[in-house]
Amino acid sequence: MLKKPFLFLLIAAFPAFSFSADFHWNLNKDDRLELVKTAKINFLINNTLQRIYEERNIIDLTCYDKKEDGSFVKGGFSVFTREHDEKVFRLTDKKLSDFEIHTNGKYSVPDKYLMPNLRHIPMFPDKEVSEGDEWTAPVELYLDNFSVELGLLLSAKYKLKGYANMEGVRTALIEYTFVINKDLSEKKTKHPDLPNKIVGENNGIIYWDTEKNQVVGMNDKYRIIFAFLNRGSLTTYEFRMNIDTESKVYRPVAENDKNKDKEEIKKELPEDSGITVESNDTGIVLRMGEVLFDFDSAKLKSETQETLKKVIDIIKKKYPDREIIVEGHTDSTGTRDYNMKLSENRANNVAEFLKGGVGHDKLSYKGYGPDRPINGNRTESERRQNRRVDITIKLK
């Protein structure tokens, strides 16, 4: 599992004298902010438990311009799910965005972007804050679950609880809460699929690096209920979530350094490994050919497992904190349903094997079937190249 420094490294409180600080967001040009938000979810209908699962959001934003009053960022918001009996997260959705994070934490997001769907957290007052101080700030929550996009304007209450020592860094502990209580009866007359009411609340704590002025992590308890009234009968759909957020800022990896790493990895893999090493805009790609699987099967050959152990060693040594993306692909022969299932099962099996060794679960899989060929499908040689599993080590 991912290490949770904000849970386990609060080992020493700072001495009991007062700090006063000017809190503000600080992202420098070319910084890449990665937020990994993992939610354990209970889904209930009419207060009866229906499903327990996990959802993960990986928010990956690169600062491409910095002004005096904020930073302009763009990147992806990826959604992953994992059922209670599954080992690895599966990619289910991805959206892009391009917006500004002002120094006080306010987001300016163009209308064409839904993401981020939760905005302005944390947001700071335009003055120094001392321990025990409280303040309020706006929160916006956007939902696209219905025929019309819903934007809910809310208010969050913050309190600076104090400071703690996290790996030698003075870290602010900021409590916050917001409540949802929205009656949508009027809107429902035009959009019948809307709920009559949405209620809920969020209670969280933010861990803020006071030296770099960046978020370290968050813990949230979140609850939201959608209430539908139909012919006098009330039905409620409820989501209860415990959400852990980890954050890290990466500096860009130079193209020369990426190429150097690529060549070093090639040398570390056996010549007959069946894996080629390439690079793309995302990072370094270890491409597994179909020869590493049994024919028309997702089962890993015994020799493939030995090869993947070497891949695990490389990841642990060179990229212990990087996101790992496993993608399965097929050629275009056969039915689409069969190809989609085969590609997904192969990717899942590789991802599960990797997870057993890399020491973290910032790792996901997705099957694309025949949708992303790297060559034509006219000859057997071309089709063979399309039948593959790609392991991407995310560097940017």
Image (cartoon, grey):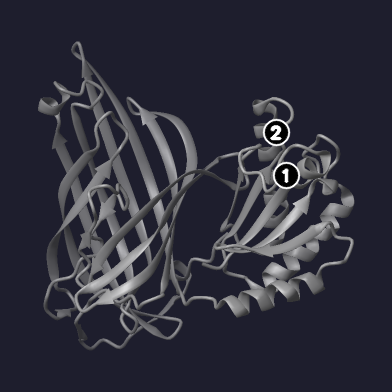
Q: Is residue 141 above or below residue 164?
A: above
Q: Secondary structure at mark 2?
A: loop
Identify which residue, 358 or 159, lies in the foreground.
358
The image quadrant of residue 332 is top right
Residue at image x 44%, y 71%?
248
Based on the displayed image, in which of its 4 quarters is residue 314 positioned? bottom right
Q: Which residue is mark 2?
A: 332
User: Could one spot residue 216 in this view of the protein?
Assistant: no
Amino acid at circle 2: Ser
Alpha-carbon span between mark 2 and mark 1: 9 Å
Which label number is shown at residue 386?
A: 1
Do callouts 2 and 1 mark residues in contact (Cβ within 8 Å)?
A: yes
The percent coordinates of residue 371 (x first, y second) are 61, 39
- Density class for disc 1 (Cα within 10 Å; few <14, some 14-19, many ≥20) is many
> Dividing the image into 4 quarters, which one contains the N terminus?
bottom right
Residue 30, compared with residue 244, is above or below; it is: below
**Relative to 334, 133 lies left or right:** left
Question: 10 Å neighbourhood of mark 2: few (<14), some, or many (≥20)?
Answer: some
Q: Residue at image x 65%, y 26%?
A: 337
Tell me if 105 is positioned left or right of 285 in this view: left
